[in-house]
Amino acid sequence: MFTEEEWQRFLKYFDILKTISSTSLISVRYSRERGIVEYIARDGKTIVRTEHIKDILNSLPHQEPSS
């Protein structure tokens, strides 16, 4: 579903997202199999937003290959 490069780009983004969400009233989790990120209320049950990982990747800047 995702190339290794795409997945590594997503994981870098997700680490930042987790850090930001730790100070807010939501938590985040992802499902590689389903290709989504879920934003969950602090009750641990209510999903307040769902985002597709492909959409996230499309909005991130592409990294230049290292030489």
Image: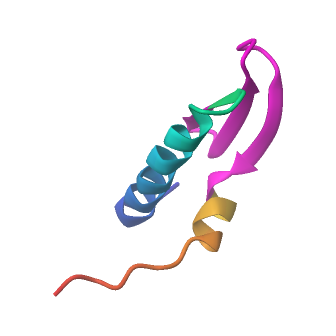
Whether 41 is drawn above or below 35: the answer is above
Measured as percent of width and height from the top left, residue 30 is found at 58, 37
Residue placed most toward the observer, 38 or 25: 25
Q: Please tell me in which quadrant of the rendered image residue 48 appears.
A: top right
Is-magenta flag for residue 51? yes
Image side of residue 23 versus residue 4, left or right: right
Main SS category, magenta section: strand
Measured as percent of width and height from the top left, residue 47 is found at 80, 27
Residue placed most toward the observer, 30 or 44: 44
Measured as percent of width and height from the top left, residue 14 is found at 50, 47
Whether 52 is drawn above or below 41: the answer is below
Whether 51 is drawn above or below 6: the answer is above
Q: Can I make out residue 33 in this image?
A: yes
Image side of residue 16 versus residue 37, left or right: left
Image side of residue 63 versus residue 37, left or right: left
* Region in magenta: 28-53
Q: Residue drawn at (72%, 35%), measured in percent from left and top?
A: 39
